[in-house]
Image (cartoon, rainbow, N blue to C red):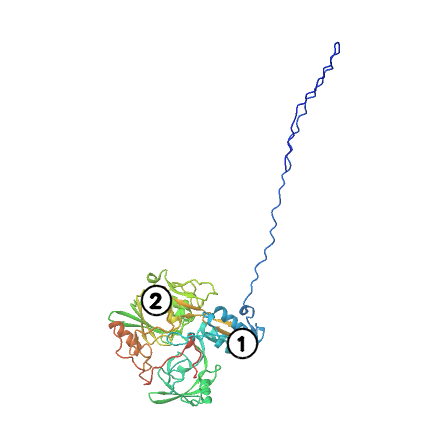
Amino acid sequence: MRFLTVLSCAVMAAVLSACGGGASPPPPVTVTPPAEPPPPVTPPVVVEPPPVTPPVSPPVITLPDWYTLYNHCEHPATGQTQGTLNDELHWVYSYVDEVYLWYTELPKLNMADYKTPLDYFSVLKTTAVTPSGRAKDRFHFTYPTDVWEAMSGAGVELGYGVTWSHTASGVLPRVWAVAMVEPGSPAESAGLRRGDALLSVNGVDMQDTSTEGVAAINAALAPAKAGDSYPFVLSRGGVSQPVTLTAAKVTAAPVQNFKLLASASGTVGYVQFHDHNAVAESQLVDAFTRFKSAGVSDLVLDMRYNGGGYLVLAAELAYMIAGPDTTRGKVFEQLHRNDKQRVLSPQLFDATAAGLSPKLMARGSALPYLGLKRVTVLTTPATCSASESLVNGLRGADIEVTLIGGETCGKPYAFTPTPNCGTTYFSIEMQGANNKGFGDYADGFAPTCKVDDDLAHEMGDTSEGMLAAALNYRATGVCPATPLRNRSLKSSPLQVERPQGKQIAIRLR
């Protein structure tokens, strides 16, 4: 808006002068002074309103099928939603495609060709191989959810309480033997001992290769329910030992047989550690408390049959071995996921308990530690997953780890158990690396001294081949001249087949 300025002008009246004489003078002229100029007019200030911002709608989040189809089941149980086979198959694909470490290597499959989600899941994995020619993914598996929860939480398994050692699958003659018997189990009650050789099962010779014979053997090795009974014939020292085994829900003891062994250079602690499950936490604390009180200066950790479990428990055990001075501020394991997932915080060495089983061990409880600079671990191909993370994590903190026995299984991978419709799925999600960034051991860790599992002696016996070699190497730094063969079976080296870290029962193939 403009302001108008009024200019003021002076006006002079013209005086006419007549000619002639004697004329009257003109009347006076009245001069009217100019009017005062009006004050300037200030127009009002116009305040324009702020621009109106339209409301922003929240972003639309599209959840993947494995969220929206969760527990939409073809045959729903209580608490589940009626769904279809197609719903379950789509759930499986969505879950694997989202979390699988190697999702870009998934094969192109026709979903309609599969009649169950388990059949579909079993082949929905990479077909690549490692440099040694082994399958890159040997750890793709499922469990019934109730079975998995019982195993991982309370260490409860359906079976006889036997860990079997045997020749490789498909190799004849089949040589099967008892590797370990759980205390208080049906196998212990029936008198089975480590080293007993299996001759026949369910009335069928172990060398039977017929379809019917293999099915009968598998039915007995993998009982369907508690109370199922089957005849077994074993041999001990050449003498036949017929027994009947009745399946039960067996509570396995993950930590057993800790003892103190005297040596010229100090007290050596020995402990069997079979499973990184929830109940193992308090049992390991009890063992290490006793070791600390006894002034243990060295440790032999027997993990020959430990297939893994909770990674956090491995981080706690590593701390209890090494102590705070060596591990403070260091990474126990950094888990790396695919590029669809967020970066995880590293797993540090844990100085306090996670409280995996709160009734047994309170969360945040301080852990005992030995402060060792070296540890000896007894290993076989059944030493897997979290057990290998323990070895790798300690080495990343410059703890000397000596392996006596066999090559480990080769599983630097982890997964999050994921349930749907009564089945818990395990698909490799992560690869771990230690404080030095190393995690490439898909073909396993090689032993310092190669020694076969000696089934002729009980575990923990200082005459047992692996423990004897460990104690000798500790004292002399020398491995046995030749690998010790199994002294009871006189056969090729046996293996304990516990793929995926855990197993309900071992089947013939």
Q: What residue lies at 54% left-to-right and 76% top-to-bottom?
A: 111
User: Does 162 sit above or below residue 375?
Assistant: below
Element at label 1: helix
Residue 482: % across, % down: 27, 79
Residue 298: % across, % down: 29, 69
Q: Nearer the viewer, residue 189 or 142?
A: 142
Q: What residue lies at 54% left-to-right and 67% top-to-bottom?
A: 64
Q: Quadrant of residue 288?
A: bottom left
Amino acid type indicated by mark 2: Leu
Q: Nearer the viewer, residue 427 or 10?
A: 10
User: Does 57 sit above or below residue 306?
Assistant: above
Residue 87: % across, % down: 56, 73
- Residue 154 tag number: none
Q: Nearer the viewer, residue 386 or 7?
A: 7
Q: Quadrant of the C terminus?
A: bottom left
Give the crowd class for mark 2: few <14, some 14-19, many >=20 residues within 10 Å. Answer: many
Q: Is residue 467 visible?
A: yes
Label 2 belongs to which residue?
A: 394
3D distance between C-alphas at marks 1 and 2: 44 Å
Residue 311: % across, % down: 41, 68
Q: Nearer the viewer, residue 143 or 462?
A: 143
Q: Give whichever of discs 1 and 2 has the lower sequence position.
A: 1
Give the crowd class for mark 1: few <14, some 14-19, many >=20 residues within 10 Å. Answer: some
Q: Is residue 99 left or right of residue 4?
A: left
Element at label 2: helix
Label 1 belongs to which residue?
A: 111
User: Does 210 sit above or below residue 316?
Assistant: below
- Do callouts 1 and 2 mark residues in contact (Cβ within 8 Å)? no
Residue lying at the far top in this picture: please name it.
Answer: 22
Amino acid type indicated by mark 1: Met
Q: Is residue 77 visible?
A: no
Q: Quadrant of residue 499?
A: bottom left
